[in-house]
Amino acid sequence: MKKGMIIFISLLLLVLVIGYLSQGSIDRNRRILKLAHGLNTRHPVHKAMEFMARRASELSGGELEVQIFPSEQLGNEKECIESLQLGYLAMTKTSTGPMEAFVPRIRIFGIPYLFRDSEHFWKVAQGPIGKDLLSAGESKGLRGLCYYDAGARSFYSKDEPINKPSDLAGKKVRVMNSVMSMDMIKAMGGSPTPISWGELYTSLDQGVVDAAENNPPSFDTSRHFEICKYYCLDEHVRLPDMLVISAKVWADLSPQQKEWLQQAVEESVAYERKLWSEAEEESMKVVEAGGVVVSYPDKRPFQEAVKPMWNKFLNAENPDDRAIGDLILKIQEIQ
């Protein structure tokens, strides 16, 4: 009896061990990519990345899983980019603003009034210039996968509207951790104040800053319109969002995994552009219903104020700045 029980237990343990090893083999073949970003879950870009994660899983039959951590759970944009370089984090969504510090040529997106409209922007982003800029950070451990539409950024403020550059005089304006953003606010006469996105609501509420600038869906989903009752659509810059993967992680993916991921990403871009168009329209309704006064100022005074920024690059002797100047001219030629 005892011998039979011993044999039974031995066989049971053997089955459990085989099952465990088999599961371990499956887990080794399954790749999990952690993606962190600062937006909340209502934002259209977050929804597009959820779509991308679903498609990656579907295309790979579950072999490729993208886990998303929104709302700065794993750090702000700069911290997430640094984590990618070290290989601690697989992917992040960042505005091109913070990327400037890591990939200097990305500064081109921060040139105010560089793009005539959304159509002009997408011709550049999906053409040779945009594709080249996605790969420009590979030597720094950063590989761009795509651009997501982030519309045009405009000013919103607490106490009075910003309908001309002189309205920025004496005002502290929140900007991203971006040299181009800071230079733009200075050129227009304001005082740039870098603050992380997650801290901005409190900073506006407590008077740390008087104004900020962003696109309609971000103004809406952040609830900043509860504090800032003036939104002036000067549309000074079109900074796209970028989906970026660690170059170390990318190199470690198999060719098939890269194909699955890139296809899922490209499908999510088309999905996000549709979501974005709908979200912009809906967000404008939300903020106006919330008591925000929306204005459409003459853009020419703003364009005149930032001319020195253009001239800095067009007349540059520094090779890096000269490269930006050359890109400005090429972008302006695109019809």
Image (cartoon, rainbow, N blue to C red):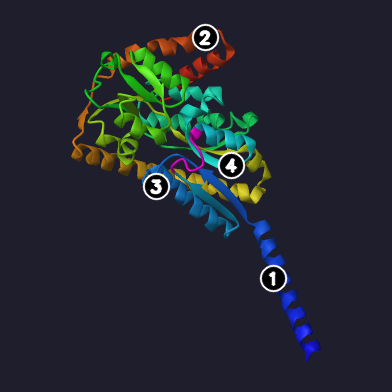
Cα–Cα span, label 1 and label 2: 65 Å
Question: Residue at 34% across / 27% down in the picture?
Answer: 213
The relative height of residue 48 versus residue 236 in the rendered view (above or below) is below
Residue of label 3:
41
Question: Residue at 55% across / 22% down in the picture?
Answer: 104
**Where does the image place residue 193, in percent across and percent down from the top left?**
39, 22
Can residue 333 be seen in the rendering of this structure? no
Residue of label 2:
316
Mark 2 burial class by Cα count in 10 Å: few <14, some 14-19, many 20+? some
**Where does the image place residue 288, in percent across and percent down from the top left?**
20, 37
If you read the primary sequence from the N terminus, does the residue marked by circle 3 or circle 2 appear first?
3
Q: Amino acid at mark 2?
A: Ala
Can residue 145 be seen in the rendering of this structure? yes
If you read the primary sequence from the N terminus, does the residue marked by circle 2 or circle 4 appear first?
4
Cα–Cα span, label 4 and label 3: 20 Å
The relative height of residue 290 versus residue 33 in the rendered view (above or below) is above
**Where does the image place residue 17, in percent across and percent down from the top left?**
73, 70
The relative height of residue 22 versus residue 35 in the rendered view (above or below) is below
- Mark linked to residue 89: 4
Q: Of the residues tagged 3 and 2, which is closer to the observer?
A: 3
Task: Say whether residue 3 is left or right of residue 324.
Answer: right
Q: Of the residues tagged 2 and 4, which is closer to the observer?
A: 4
Which one is nearer the viewer's eye here, 136 or 24? 24
